[in-house]
Structure formats: C-alpha cells, structure tokens
Amino acid sequence: MEIVRAHLKIYGRVQGVGFRWSMQREARKLGLSGWVRNMPDGTVEAVVEGERERVEALIGWAYQGPPLARVTRIEVKWGIPKGERGFRILH
C-alpha cells in the first residue's frame, strides 16, 4: 500500500458551484486527508494524501466535480506525504 501526496490545481467553472464541499465529502468517503480552497485566480487548489488508488479515484472524480462545475483541466504535482489529518476546507 503506497501512501502518496498530490497537489491539485483545478481550472474551469469551479467556484460558486459547491466544489469544495463536494470534494470534502468525496475525500472523506475515500478515507483521504488534506485540504481544498478557492484561489483568487478563480481556480480551486487542493492537497490530498492517502493510498495511491484512492487519491487517483479522487482526481478522477475532480474531473467531473459536482453537477454545476465545468472542469477544463487539472494540474497534478506528486510529492512526499507530510501526514495531513482529516480533510478541511480552507478559507
């Protein structure tokens, strides 16, 4: 079981559509840790840690997002896990 960390930058119509709340719910269902936040440039940024398969499942979910979202692309940078606890929405 490989534990990984992924830093995501999600582009498109991703603010004002419930993206952060939906991602938090999905991440918790998958047993993942990390955080998600809106950025001033209109993107959503997230850090996700957990088993590689589950992190990849969340990234797959993020391409769709909640019903009103329109994701155009996601940048993923892989890194070394830092021991995130829980999955938070940062403001």
Image (cartoon, rainbow, N blue to C red):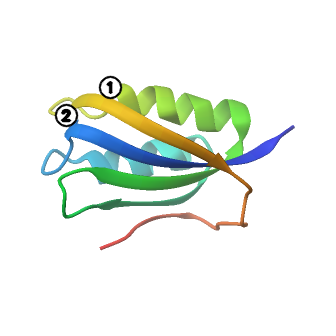
Q: Earlier in the sequence, mark 2 or mark 1?
A: 1
Mark 2, residue position? 69
Q: Is residue 36 above or below residue 59?
A: below
Q: Secondary structure at mark 1?
A: helix
Q: Quadrant of the N terminus?
A: top right
User: From the viewer's perspective, is 23 left or right of 58?
Assistant: left
Q: Is residue 72 above or below residue 40?
A: above
Point out residue 15 in the picture as x, y percentages from the top left corner: 17, 50
Q: Regarding mark 2 in the picture, which secondary structure is present there?
A: loop
Label 1 near label 2: C-beta < 8 Å? yes
Which residue is at 43% across, 38% downward? Answer: 75
Along the line of sight, the residue nearer the viewer: 6 or 1? 6
Report the residue at 60% width, 31% height from top: 56
User: For the view shown, which residue lies furthest in the right direction?
Assistant: 1
For the point 51% across and 46% down, the residue is 27
Check disc 2: other Cα within 10 Å, few if <14, some if 14-19, many if 20+: some
* Amino acid, disc 2: Ala
Tag 1 residue: 64
Query: In the figure, 38 relative to 69: above or below?
Result: below
Residue at point 73% right, 58% down? 81
Task: Estimate the x, y position of residue 21 in percent, counting from the top left.
Answer: 32, 53
Quadrant of residue 61 within the rendered picture: top left
The answer to whether 23 appears left or right of 83 in the picture is left
Question: Quick one: quadrant of the C terminus?
Answer: bottom left
Q: Position of residue 78 (x, y in %)?
A: 64, 45
Badge 1: how crowded within 10 Å, few (<14), some, or many (20+)? few
Q: CA distance from mark 2 to mark 1?
A: 7 Å
Whole-percent x and y of residue 17?
15, 44
